[in-house]
Image (cartoon, rainbow, N blue to C red):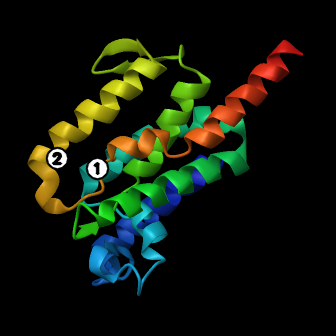
């Protein structure tokens, strides 16, 4: 599964961040430099601010990413991951001086799952909820709480719009899947 490759890249990037001086600076999204360094809209997705940030994101990416990849396939999964991550990076330009992290890509995955499998049960804070309800909770409560205590770090903390970043694609995909089910 491609999700494990993405997790491996994030872990390798985090190791490089900790052992190679200046590595983060080469690939982090800096709002004032985005026109000169447009690749950082993508590379920042693979960087993380600390071990907790990495572990939480990789847990969510592995859990939800594997489910979504099995539903939509490798190519569409990668499209959702990268479109979500890049849109989060673009949104971060307006909110932060610098940004990093896979949260936007992960919330795009969650948003897609909420649309394609809204009744799928997931656990949020030890309470089982349907996927659609869980995404709403995570999308609005999680970022609001984290912004209070981590805003000074400038981490990309899942913009509220991330869950619907690929909404047009997702709605088309849901329609196609529903037609296949009916046939």
Say the numbered circle drawn on residue 176.
Answer: none
Q: Is residue 62 above or below residue 151?
A: above
Give yes or no for contact between labels 1 and 2 (Cβ–Cβ under 8 Å).
yes
Q: Nearer the viewer, residue 139 or 67?
A: 139
- Disc 1 designates what residue? 157
- Image point (49%, 51%), residue name: 84
Q: Identify the secondary structure beneath mark 2.
A: helix
Of callouts 1 and 2, the N-terminal one: 2
Which residue occupies the foreground of this view, 77 or 183? Answer: 183
Q: Residues within 10 Å of mark 1 (few under 14, many from 20)?
A: many
User: Residue at position x 43%, y 74% from top?
Assistant: 40
Q: Residues within 10 Å of mark 2 (few under 14, many from 20)?
A: some
Residue 36 image position (x, y, % from top left)? 41, 87
Is residue 63 visible in the rendered structure shown here? no
What is the spatial separation of the Cα atoms under label 1 and label 2, in whole angstroms?
A: 7 Å
Q: Quadrant of residue 48?
A: bottom left
Work out whether residue 27 can be spotted: yes
Q: Which residue is mark 2?
A: 147
User: Is residue 130 found left or right of 156 in the rendered image?
Assistant: right
In-front residue for pair 63/32: 32
Q: Quadrant of the C terminus?
A: top right
| Left or right of residue 18, residue 130 in this image | right
């Amino acid at each position: 599964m491609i999700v494990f490759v993405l997790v491996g890249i994030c872990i390798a990037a985090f190791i490089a961040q900790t052992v190679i001086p200046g590595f983060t600076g080469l690939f982090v999204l800096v709002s004032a430099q985005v026109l000169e360094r447009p690749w950082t809209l993508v590379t920042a997705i693979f960087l993380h601010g600390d071990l907790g940030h990495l572990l939480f994101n990789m847990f969510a990416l592995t859990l939800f990413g594997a489910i979504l990849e099995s539903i939509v396939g490798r190519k569409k999964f990668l499209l959702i991951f990268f479109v979500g991550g890049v849109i989060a990076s673009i949104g971060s330009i307006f909110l932060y001086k610098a940004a990093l992290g896979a949260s936007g890509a992960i919330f795009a995955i969650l948003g897609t799952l909420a649309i394609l499998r809204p009744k799928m049960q997931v656990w949020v804070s030890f309470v089982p909820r349907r996927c659609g309800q869980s995404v709403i909770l995570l999308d609005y409560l999680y970022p609001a709480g984290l912004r209070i205590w981590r805003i000074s770090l400038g981490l990309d903390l899942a913009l509220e719009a991330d869950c619907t970043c690929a909404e047009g694609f997702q709605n088309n995909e849901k329609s196609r899947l529903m037609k296949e089910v009916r046939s």
